[in-house]
Amino acid sequence: MTDHNSPAGAVGEGQPSGQPGPFGPSQQPPQHAWQGQGNQAPAPQQPSAPQQPQPLPSDAARAQVAAAWVRSTPRAGQAAVPSLPPRETRPQGESKKEKRERERAARKAAYEQKKAEKEQRKRGGAARPAAATAPSPSSAPTAQHAPVSQHTPVHEHQAAAPAPSAASPAPAPGTGSTAPAGGGLHPGHPGHSAPKPLPARDFDVPKPGGRISGGGRRTHVALRATLLITTCVFALGSCGVMGLVIGKSSGTTTAGLDASDANRYRLTEFPTEQAAAFAEQYAQLCMTFSPDTSSARRTDLARYASAGVDPDCGWSGEGTSKAVSVTWDGTAEKLPEYGDHGRYLGVQVRTEDGTLTTLTVPVYVQNLATGEGMRVSGDVGQMPLPAAADVPEVDQGDEVVDDTLSTQLQKEVLPGYFEAWGASNATAMARFLTPDATLTATTGLAGRLTAPQIGTVVALVPASAQNSKPYTYDSGQAVQVRVAVDWTDSKGVAVRRAYRMTIVNTAQGWFVKDVRGGVLDAEGGRADSDSDSATGTASPSAGSSGAPSPSAPASAPVPSSTAKPGKS
């Protein structure tokens, strides 16, 4: 029987068996070659890649299936015509919610089918492709049978595949059971080879936005909670570390110094400078005395000293002296009786007759923070001058002197320059200066010294010009010169001063670039003897109390262990 509603209902319509019709690919399974005559079953088929059924309209699907079964009429008594898919009975007013549920059910069925195929591949078998799947139960409520024409020609080398019986149910969607897709060799056939199992996969990769397979809603909630808690812990930890770093860096830190460092750099809480100034004032009063001013001197000394200190500072009431300059020599010895509040300070006093005396003054300070409450807490003592050392000799063996250049500078350049430099005459100095001359070379003495007479001039040959003789100098070559100049001061006294100069050779001649004072003595040693380091005249001798006494003659200090200074 032929479905006349189908455009492909006619038998033969120029379409050979197994070719696609006008509505899509043929749903007919390929023909199998029989192994023999009779009722023998067809041989198992070689597994092939599954074909995905293409969606067709319900009317077209029914017509396609009917035409396929008409073209491949089975033998009598072997199979019945399967039921055609029913027409679509979806109501016209289907809502969106129902449509979503239907699509969700279809997706779930497809997922179950893929899952069944995957499990079959894991067990070592090959998935069999579905030749044709029945539509969902909602679209096929009834089943119809179509009679099969007995006049369909069958080729000799092909035989119709056994069709499912009418009593057998159609495969439901999602069950994973499919019909064989094509012919194949029997397992016992010599040309048959067992299919190789596909490699098993460890896990399935979910599609974007989906959930991980094997888990549930609880797994996803726990994972999200873990990520959230971990992020919060890291954020709190970062804030805590930053707070500790900022708090530690903002704190005030002081460098720790031990006692050795304090002694090395003379660091102390004692107000040394203020106490030294106080000791200088007392030493100046002590070394200035005269019978005419004895009462005023005693009053002034009482403002500095404590009650038990000699009120005349060791003076016997005879002779006169005047202190010209008083300077702290930088020494400070700790007073053990007062701890940090007392020091022995050394003071150098020069009188008007030229005598230099060193006195030791004990000073007490009540307030170390402000320096208030100072007192001379004992009698002063006279000490020798600091020991003098011998200056080492300077090795000048590598110096080369150009006598020709020294004579030229002494006669042509230096007399005019020093005359202008002593008077600070900028116009006259410009004739002798280089454009980049230093400030000391362009300033001058402003008339403090006059009438310069050039003495010894020593021009040192640079190392780059020592290979040629007579010595030649390139343009821009600088030469170091040592000069001794005799001046006349404002009182008409002749004085000698030494200078170090830098002279530069140019195309126009030699010009002065720099002038500096002082020339080193190459001989070294010492000019005095050990006996000359003794204390000079006008130094008061020490009495029984340890205080200096001016009762000794002016020529030399005379110690007195029994006499006590008198009182005026």
Image (cartoon, rainbow, N blue to C red):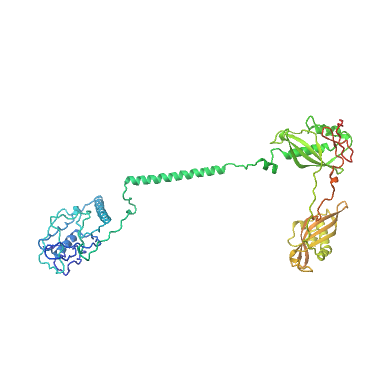
User: Can residue 265 be seen?
Assistant: no
Residue 201 or 423: which is nearer the viewer? Answer: 201
The residue sitting at the top extreme is 307
The residue depicted at 47 percent of the width and 44 percent of the height is 237
- Pick the quarter of the image with the C terminus: top right
User: Can residue 544 be seen?
Assistant: yes
Determine whether 531 is above or below 153 in the image. Answer: above
Q: Where is residue 425, by image quadrant?
A: bottom right
The residue depicted at 82 percent of the width and 38 percent of the height is 382
Looking at the image, residue 158 sits to the left or right of residue 464; the answer is left
- Pick the quarter of the image with the N terminus: bottom left
How many marks overall?
0
Residue 73: x and y, percent? Answer: 13, 64
Residue 86: x and y, percent? Answer: 16, 56
Residue 173: x and y, percent? Answer: 21, 54
Looking at the image, residue 416 sits to the left or right of residue 189; the answer is right
Residue 337: x and y, percent? Answer: 73, 32
Looking at the image, residue 359 sits to the left or right of residue 86; the answer is right
Q: Where is residue 196, by image quadrant?
A: bottom left
Determine whether 328 is above or below 133 in the image. Answer: above
Residue 4 or 475: which is nearer the viewer? Answer: 475
